[in-house]
Structure formats: structure tokens, C-alpha cells
């Protein structure tokens, strides 16, 4: 009997069985929680940046790493959370009977004339409205990387980021008008007197555009100079802008 050949085929058989029952998934996060759905498996966490990352599974410490990786085993579904000392990029990999999920869905809304509008992401952008009762679907748009919504006397305004490009969509009287702003990664919009304010950021700065009711640019100005902005949001019904820069929240009163 050729024991070497038999061992080789046995190893192939085990590998085939593992490939049928275990799948590999990978997600990247900036420190926000990642969900694991499934059963037994091995999860690895890799950190890029300066600082220490402590890893928890359902609130229990399972490892830590400093610009490196750490691994742990799981036997059930749970939430993977992190404690980080500085801004870092974290990649989570799983070889398991399950999958990793890092779908961060943002819900935004605004109100005008007694009607509340809400915008939620996912596989597509969906706008809902309510006059005080249940929310009903108004319309849908193509999926976006970042988005915001505002309503005012001029209509319903959406600001979206797709493939690194900022776009404004104004719907009024059943018609939609679009306007491109350029290359940006984050966006926020709000109504302002008889027009709109649109804030956008990239890896250099945060700019604010003052637009007329018909989307003509009245003026633009720099609100913040930083390459590490992670999010923008207006206080609806006002001209106050909140800028998430690293672990700081910077508030700018624009008028």
C-alpha cells in the first residue's frame, strides 16, 4: 500500500469538505462594529495605523494588536467591537460557517409644512414621507456612498455621493433637476431662506455652497481645512454644520 499517496488523497478529501462547509468573508471598518452571523469559525483582525486596537466579541475581550493582526475562534453569532487609541483602518476576515456584515445604513430626515421626509440607504436610496401617520414610500434612487435630504419652499433636495462625485437632485412640481459639484466623499444639505446650503468634503477640505432655489451657486467658502473628515451633518432648519473630524465633532455656525 502506498501510504504516502493515501495520505495525500485523504488531505484532499478533508480540504474539499472544509471548502464545502467553511466560507471566507472580509470587511473593512474604521472602528465601527462588525456583525458575525453563523456558527463555528476563525476570525482574524488586522489593523493598519498607529495605535493599539483591542478587540471584543459580544463584549468579551478576545485579543489586541498594534499595527498587526490577532485571531480568535467563534462558535455562534455575535458582534465584533473595537477600542482604538487613534484613527485606524481595520480589516476583519472570517473563515467560518457564517459571514461578516458591515452594512452601515444612515437614516436622515427633514420636515416642512407639516410633512416629514426620511431618506434611508441600503441597496438603494428610498425616500419616505408622513403627514403625521405611517410613512409611505415616495420614490427610490440608485445606491449612494453618502447622502442627505432637505425640504423647503423650493421642493425636496437630495445630496448624494456616488463613485467619489457629489450630485444634487432637486424635485419640485413633479420634475427633478440635477447638478454636479465635483469630487467629494461626504455631503450634507439644508434649506436656507429661499435657497439651499450644501456642505461637501474631500481629503483636503470642507466647502459650503450657497445655492439659489434653482440650484445656481450664489457663493462658496471653506468651512474647515483637514484631510480626516469622516462625516457632515446640518442641524435641520438652521445653518449650523457639524463636522466629524477624527474623534472630534466641530460645530460651525455659518450665518
Image (spheres, grey):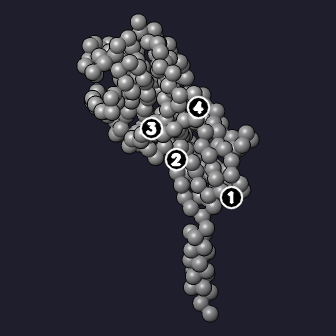
Q: Residue furthest bottom?
A: 1
Q: Say few, some or many: other residues with alpha carbon within 10 Å of mark 2 (under 14 / 14 to 19 / 20 or more).
A: some
Residue 67 placement (x, y as % from top left): 55, 38
Label 4 or label 1, whichever lies nearer to me, is 4
The residue tagged 3 is 138
Q: Which residue is drawn at 39% across and 41% down?
A: 141
The residue tagged 1 is 39
Q: Earlier in the sequence, mark 1 or mark 2?
A: 2
Establish if 251 lies above or below 31: above
The residue tagged 4 is 133
**Location of residue 187 (image quadrant):** top left
* C-alpha gap between disc 4 and disc 1: 41 Å
Task: Answer with left or right where residue 42 lies relative to residue 188.
Answer: right
The residue tagged 2 is 27
Q: Which of 124 and 140 is in front in this view?
A: 140
Q: Is mark 2 on a helix, strand or loop?
A: strand
Q: Is mark 3 on a helix, strand or loop?
A: strand
Amino acid at each position: 500500500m502506498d501510504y504516502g499517496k493515501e495520505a495525500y488523497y485523504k488531505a484532499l478529501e478533508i480540504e474539499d469538505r472544509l471548502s464545502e462547509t467553511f466560507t471566507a468573508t472580509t470587511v473593512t471598518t474604521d472602528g465601527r462594529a462588525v456583525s458575525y452571523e453563523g456558527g463555528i469559525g476563525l476570525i482574524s483582525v488586522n489593523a493598519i495605523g498607529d495605535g493599539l486596537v483591542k478587540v471584543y466579541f459580544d463584549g468579551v475581550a478576545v485579543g489586541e494588536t498594534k499595527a498587526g493582526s490577532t485571531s480568535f475562534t467563534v462558535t455562534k453569532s455575535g458582534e465584533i467591537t473595537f477600542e482604538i487609541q487613534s484613527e485606524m483602518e481595520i480589516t476583519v476576515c472570517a473563515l467560518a460557517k457564517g459571514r461578516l456584515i458591515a452594512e452601515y445604513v444612515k437614516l436622515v430626515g427633514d420636515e416642512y409644512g407639516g410633512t416629514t421626509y426620511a431618506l434611508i440607504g441600503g441597496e438603494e436610496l428610498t425616500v419616505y414621507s408622513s403627514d403625521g401617520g405611517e410613512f409611505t414610500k415616495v420614490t427610490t434612487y440608485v445606491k449612494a456612498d453618502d447622502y442627505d435630504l432637505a425640504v423647503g419652499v423650493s421642493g425636496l433636495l437630495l445630496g448624494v455621493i456616488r463613485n467619489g462625485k457629489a450630485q444634487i437632485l432637486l424635485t419640485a412640481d413633479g420634475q427633478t433637476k440635477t447638478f454636479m459639484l465635483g469630487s467629494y466623499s461626504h455631503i450634507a444639505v439644508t434649506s436656507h431662506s429661499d435657497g439651499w446650503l450644501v456642505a461637501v468634503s474631500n481629503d483636503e477640505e470642507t466647502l459650503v455652497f450657497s445655492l439659489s432655489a434653482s440650484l445656481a451657486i450664489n457663493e462658496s467658502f471653506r468651512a474647515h481645512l483637514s484631510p480626516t473628515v469622516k462625516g457632515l451633518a446640518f442641524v435641520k432648519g438652521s445653518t449650523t454644520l457639524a463636522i466629524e473630524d477624527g474623534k472630534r465633532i466641530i460645530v460651525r455656525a455659518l450665518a
